[in-house]
Each structure stands twice: as structure tokens, then as C-alpha cells.
């Protein structure tokens, strides 16, 4: 395999692990359904307290995965995503929004909580990248970068005595689709929802054009499995349990209703501005400087799901109808 630029590669110095990492049973998914794979992660976490450590590797159809406590209307461009077939999903861990497609490798480490140490898992990922020839570093609490450019984001979830540490690795993703999907709307939001930290990103293939996702997957397997056979994740999980989680993953109550309360101001075509308060994805209050408009908007939208693009398209018609 061809090596990338020297700046992006290890300089031969020995990397020090915080402590010897455990070996992992590696399980792979051949499904590109992000909802199924996220549901599988939940099921693996459910049993992680009593199981040997597991590394789950998977890819996805184009999707934006937001953190548990994020606002999808603020974090991504939902109309563009709908038009271009990019799915929206919400994961069980915190952190910021990430873009997935088949050029991105997702890794998820599961283990009893007493065994988990973040520095050790980050070291495992950094060592794996070193095995591939990359000089990566941890640039903040959750990101890994090469030459100052982000290639990986990480998030964490703890349940009872179980730990999940999962992350992304950009190998050959469609970065134009990533940027378009993660473009925030210009509306002012007031919310306590977690806001993504924007960063310049690059694919690992920018340094090594011959690198494929399969190479990165195989490097994880070689470093983590210690020769143990790999398993298909389907064989590790109860199908009915995963299907139940998929139903929850795809429900509006999770995708939108999980959003922390927020207020947003949106302009109308004639320059007027409306403000809305939203809780659990439902409009609870509508205000406008014009009293007549406010009455019309309240009748039209209070108590309904927040759907800003539909609202902006229809609001002028509603106002005109009520004011006749």
C-alpha cells in the first residue's frame, strides 16, 4: 500500500499506551442501514457488563447521526438531506453531529465499565492509524486529527456497569455531501441542546489515495482481535431485540421529540419575523409583532409538529385567509 505524505505519517517514535488494552471479539456488519447498526450497538451495550470486550465495525448509507441531546433543525440541513436521500438518525451517546456514508468506518468498543479507560481506547485507535502509516493525534476530548485536520469524532455512553466508546473514521467519504448535510440554518436558536463543534475535516485517502475502508477495517482486526475469529454481528444478537430497537430509532418521538426545548426566530418573505417555542418537537407558542398575524399563526401551528420549511411555505396563505 502506498504511503501518504510524511507530515501525515508516524515518525518512528514509540507510542505509549496508558495501560495494556484488552483483546476484543471483533464483530462486523454487512448492512448499510444506519438504524439497524445503531440498534445493534444498543443491544451490544445492553450485554456489555457481563460479556468479553467487543469491537463492532460497520459502514452506513448516507446519513447524519446527531447526538442524543442535539437539535436536528439547528445541526443539519434537513431539506437538502431529504432531497438527496441522506437519512437522519439520533444515537444514544452525546456529542456532535457526524456524517456517515460507505466511505466512513464506524468503530464501537463495548466492555464492562470497570475495564473502560478512554485514554486506552484512543490509544488503540491511534495505534491502528499508526499501523496504516498515519501520524494522528488527539486534538480535543473527542477528536482525532492528522496534520491538524479532523479525521475522527468520538462519543461515549455508559449504562449501569457497561461502557460504549464509538467513533468515525473518514476514509473516502463524500465531503461535499458532508458539508451540505451539516450546514446549519441561519435562524437564531435559544436552547441548551448540545451544539456541534465545527472543524476542518479530511479523508485519510487525501494522504494515501490507495487507502480503502477495507484496509482500515483489517488494521483494526489485526490490532484488536489477537487472532480470534471474526463474527457477523447478526449471529451475535437476537433479531427481535434489534428490530424493536430499530422501531424506536426510526420513530419521530426519538428523532425529533427527543430534542431539548428551544425557541427560534424565523423571517417571512416580507421581512416580518415570527418566533416559536418548541418542546418535544411540538410548537407550544407562536409570537409575531403583528397581532393579526400572530392569531393566524397560533391557529395554524400551535400544538403541531415543528416543520419550519412547510410552515414558511404555508404561513402567508394562512395569514391571508384569516385576515380576509
Image (cartoon, rainbow, N blue to C red):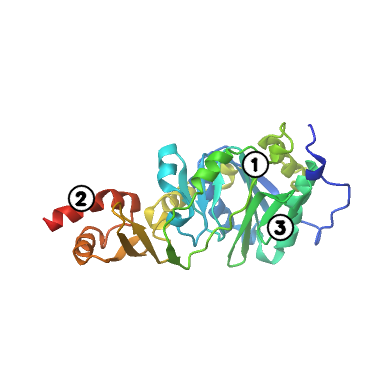
Q: Residue furthest toward the front?
A: 271
Image check: 83 left or right of 217?
left
Dot 1 or dot 2, earlier in sequence: 1
Q: Residue at x 62, y 53 (%)?
A: 199
Occupied quadrant, residue 84:
top left
Q: Quadrant of the C terminus?
A: bottom left
- Label 2, label 3: how far apart the Cα atoms are: 50 Å
Q: For marks 1 and 2, give the one nearer the viewer.
A: 2
Residue under label 2: 317
Q: Which mark is residue 183?
A: none
- Measured as percent of width and height from the top left, residue 182 is found at 51, 49
Q: Nearer the viewer, residue 62 or 206?
A: 206
Query: Please, what secondary structure does the residue beneath circle 1 have?
Result: strand
Badge 2 density bin: few <14, some 14–19, many ≥20, Cα 10 Å: few
Q: Compared with residue 61, is residue 89 higher up or lower down, i.e. above or below?
A: below
Badge 1 density bin: few <14, some 14–19, many ≥20, Cα 10 Å: some
Q: Quadrant of the N terminus?
A: top right
Query: Please, what secondary structure does the residue beneath circle 3 have?
Result: loop
Residue under label 3: 139
- Label 3, label 1: how far apart the Cα atoms are: 33 Å
Q: Residue at x 23, y 60 (%)?
A: 297
- Measured as percent of width and height from the top left, residue 251 is found at 39, 52
Image check: 14 left or right of 107?
right
Q: Compared with residue 295, is residue 202 higher up or lower down, i.e. above or below?
A: above
Q: Residue 214: in sight, yes or no?
A: yes
- Measured as percent of width and height from the top left, residue 115 is found at 71, 63
Residue under label 1: 231
Q: Residue at x 75, y 54 (%)?
A: 137
Occupied quadrant, residue 105:
top right
Amino acid at each position: 500500500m502506498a504511503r501518504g505524505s510524511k507530515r501525515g505519517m508516524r515518525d518512528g517514535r514509540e507510542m505509549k499506551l496508558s495501560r495494556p488494552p484488552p483483546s476484543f471479539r471483533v464483530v462486523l456488519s454487512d448492512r448499510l442501514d444506519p438504524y439497524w447498526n445503531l440498534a445493534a450497538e444498543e443491544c451490544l451495550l445492553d450485554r456489555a457488563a457481563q460479556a468479553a470486550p467487543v469491537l463492532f465495525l460497520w459502514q452506513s448509507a448516507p446519513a447524519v447521526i446527531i447526538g442524543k441531546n442535539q437539535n436536528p433543525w439547528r445541526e443539519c440541513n434537513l431539506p437538502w438531506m431529504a432531497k438527496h436521500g441522506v437519512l437522519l438518525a439520533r444515537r444514544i451517546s452525546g456529542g456532535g453531529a457526524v456524517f456517515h456514508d460507505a466511505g466512513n468506518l464506524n468503530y464501537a468498543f463495548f466492555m464492562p465499565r470497570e475495564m473502560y479507560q478512554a485514554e486506552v481506547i484512543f490509544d488503540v485507535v491511534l495505534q491502528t492509524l499508526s499501523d496504516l502509516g498515519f501520524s494522528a493525534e488527539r486534538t480535543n476530548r473527542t477528536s482525532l486529527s492528522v496534520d491538524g485536520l479532523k479525521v475522527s469524532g468520538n462519543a461515549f455512553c455508559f449504562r449501569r456497569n457497561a461502557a460504549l466508546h464509538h467513533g468515525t473514521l473518514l476514509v473516502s467519504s463524500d465531503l461535499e455531501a458532508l458539508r451540505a448535510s451539516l450546514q446549519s440554518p441561519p435562524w437564531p436558536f435559544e436552547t441548551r441542546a448540545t451544539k456541534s463543534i465545527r472543524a476542518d475535516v479530511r479523508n485519510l485517502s487525501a494522504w494515501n489515495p490507495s487507502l480503502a475502508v477495507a484496509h482500515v477495517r483489517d488494521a483494526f482486526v489485526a490490532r484488536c482481535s489477537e487472532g480470534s475469529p471474526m463474527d457477523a454481528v447478526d449471529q451475535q444478537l437476537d433479531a427481535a431485540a434489534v428490530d424493536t430497537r430499530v422501531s424506536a430509532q426510526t420513530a419521530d418521538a426519538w428523532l425529533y421529540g427527543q430534542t431539548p426545548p428551544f425557541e427560534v426566530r424565523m423571517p417571512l418573505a416580507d421581512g416580518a419575523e415570527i418566533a416559536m417555542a418548541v418542546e418535544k418537537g411540538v410548537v407550544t407558542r407562536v409570537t409575531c409583532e403583528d397581532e393579526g398575524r400572530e392569531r393566524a399563526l397560533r391557529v395554524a401551528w400551535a400544538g403541531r409538529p415543528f416543520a419550519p420549511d412547510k410552515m414558511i411555505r404555508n404561513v402567508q396563505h394562512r395569514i391571508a385567509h384569516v385576515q380576509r
